[in-house]
Amino acid sequence: MIALYDLMLKAQDGSALDVMAKQFGLAQRQANEAVSALMPAFSEGMKRAAANPYDFTSFLKALYSGDHAKYFEDMTKAFTPTGIAEGNDLLSQFFGSKEVSRAIAAQAAQMTGIGQEIYKQMLPVVANTLMGGLFKQSASPFFPGMQQDKDNPFLAAMQQWMEATGMAKKPEPQTNPFNNPFTQAFFGTTPKKETQDLFADNPFAKAFSDMMSVMSGKKPEEEAAPEKAETPADSWSKFVNTLFDTGLEMQKDYQKNIEEIFDTMSRSAAAPPPKDPKDAK
């Protein structure tokens, strides 16, 4: 899986920073700093936009429209009125409101010293470019070494999404071929479920296991604490975090500030509207 920062740098045949620097009157070093400062916000926004399989539907719709691939191939198209409009539509999906976009631009400006107005203009460009790159990555193995059936994370995303929304049947658990009366009588086992260890209740196997534990310096009665079962929500969250990884190590305070922007706006959106004083009369 290619991280968002690396994906961004691959745009326009690897000349993304040159294009951004020229467009916004920055040195290449500054362009790199600007792009880096925005990656945590896009990562956080995309993760929240795909917080559950049902929210992921709108993301997939935008992704597989294929409308943004042209911006990844030629970033100059993202600076046109049409490109800016489509980029702002994506920002609305990722960030939820213009207030979040402005807060992110202000935070990035404070971090790098690059003007806030530049970030405001840069945000829709980056949104279009990233979405185009994600589409290219999901639609074809055009990156060196990527095999579409093996390394394409979006194939797994689509499968998980379809299973979670009921559009695809979950795979049946594999049947234990030794779960039959003959093997149970022979080995002294009575499996409680298909995935149980075949030799778990066999006294000979247990004695051998205890002996090996003693030889390794571990007492037989010592048992590993049972692992907490991973819920579907945990699995989905882990998958989305991997899918939209920034690929950068940012300052913890900066990352925390970005997350706080989203949290603050979410709380504001969820808060009930203030009561009209007239209603109290």
Image: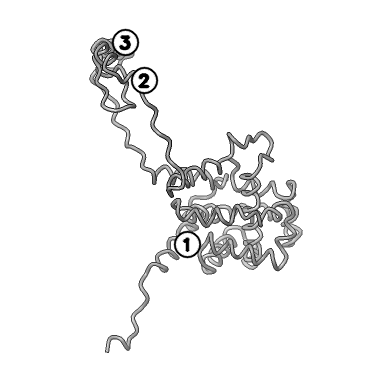
In the shown orientation, is residue 226 left or right of residue 165?
left
Q: Earlier in the sequence, mark 1 or mark 3?
A: 3
Judge the density around disc 2: few (<14), some (14-19), many (≥20) Cα neighbours within 10 Å. few
Residue 8: image location, x then y, percent: 65, 49
Q: Which of marks 1 and 2 is nearer the N terminus?
A: 2
Residue 247: image location, x then y, percent: 57, 44
For mark 3, give the secondary structure: helix
At label 2, the amino acid type is Pro
Tell me if residue 206 comes above or below residue 233 in the rendering. Answer: above
Q: How far apart are marks 2 and 3 (CA)?
A: 32 Å
Q: Which of 78 and 157 is in front in this view?
A: 157
Residue 244: image location, x then y, percent: 54, 48
Give the residue drawn at x 64%, y 36%.
146
State yes or no: discs 1 and 2 in contact (Cβ < 8 Å).
no
Q: In which quarter of the image is the C terminus?
A: bottom left
Which label was assigned to residue 261? 1
At label 3, the amino acid type is Met
Which label was assigned to residue 177? 2
Which label was assigned to residue 215? 3
Label tally: 3
